[in-house]
Amino acid sequence: MTAVLKLRPLLTATHRYDKSLSTRDRGHGQIIQAPILAYLIETTNGRILFDVGCDYAKIAAPKLRAQYYENENFAFGAPDMQEPQRLPHHLAQLGLTPADIDVVFLSHLHFDHAGGLCDVCGTEVHVQQDELTAAQAGTDIAYFPSDFSGDYPWQVKQGEYDLVPGVRAISTPGHTAGHMSLWLEMPKGPPILLCGDAADLTENIEQEIAPGLCWNERSDLALESIRKLKRLGREEHADLWPNHDIDFFNTLKRYPNFHE
């Protein structure tokens, strides 16, 4: 029996950028607006936060913004993130604080998925060993080392595993070396696969298009992961949720409402 009770999508920011960053070798010159999401998963075994969004200080403080986003590496600049979109404000709507989160599960360590760790200090953080190794190598501009260099209580994992009954970490490398998706066995509806950046857009899934950015240019690995997610979806009649698709996001229940 699943331990999952409720799933709440959290909009932590939005980012405008060239579509080709999400769909490899297509969409050049087309600007899209992408949601930057986290997910609060309530279970009978505690609360899990899937991803944590950006570090607000790097966006709001002019010197930090210039350092991290206003340079040749970031042609499209910083995400649009407002103070009320920070995780503590989302949690406060439910009468919670970051101390009420039991596990942070990171799909990967890019700035828009791991930057918000500073807002949930002290919470157990799950990440893959391959992901941490690649991030520390410093060869990918989307990793900001200061996002994950703090004294966090890391739980460094290798491969797939169950977090709690009904919540399983699914290996989906390609976008990054140790990217993970998350399988949720819902209490009422069909299972949900949170794809993370294995599939930014519905288009990535339906047309089997690799993300624009792939670890070591391993688009083949990214495609294998998309096909794996699709196979799991077919076999288990699960819904696949892309991660940066504004149209898909607009079909979801608005926080603090929830899916179950």
Image (cartoon, helix red, strand yellow):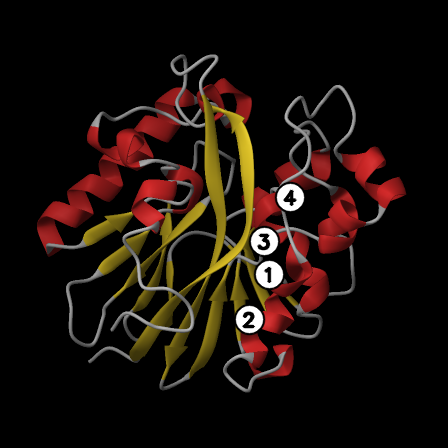
Which amino acid is tagged 3?
Answer: Gly
- Which type of secondary structure does the marked residue at label 3 adopt? loop
User: Is 62 displayed left or right of 179 in the figure?
Assistant: right
Mark 1 is surrounded, within 10 Å at the Cα level, by few (under 14), some (14 to 19) or many (20 or more) other residues, namely some
Question: Do labels 4 and 1 touch, CB within 8 Å?
Answer: no
Which amino acid is tagged 1?
Answer: Gln
Q: Residue furthest right?
A: 63
Determine the image quadrant of residue 133.
Answer: top right
> What residue is rendered at 84% in x and 35% in y?
67
User: Could you tell me how far apart the alpha carbons at marks 2 and 3 are, in whole angstroms?
Assistant: 12 Å
Quadrant the N terminus occupies: bottom left
Which residue is disc 3 drawn over?
Answer: 53
User: Is 73 displayed left or right of 206 in the figure?
Assistant: right
Q: Position of residue 219 (x, y in %)?
A: 40, 21
Which amino acid is tagged 4?
Answer: Phe
Residue 85: numbered disc: 1
Q: Is residue 109 visible?
A: no
> What residue is rendered at 20% in x and 40% in y?
230
User: Is 143 displayed left or right of 32 in the figure?
Assistant: right
Residue 111: numbered disc: 4
Which amino acid is tagged 2?
Answer: His
User: Could you tell me how far apart the alpha carbons at marks 4 and 2 are, in whole angstroms?
Assistant: 19 Å
Q: Position of residue 116 (x, y in %)?
A: 65, 58
User: Could you tell me how far apart the alpha carbons at marks 4 and 3 are, in whole angstroms?
Assistant: 7 Å
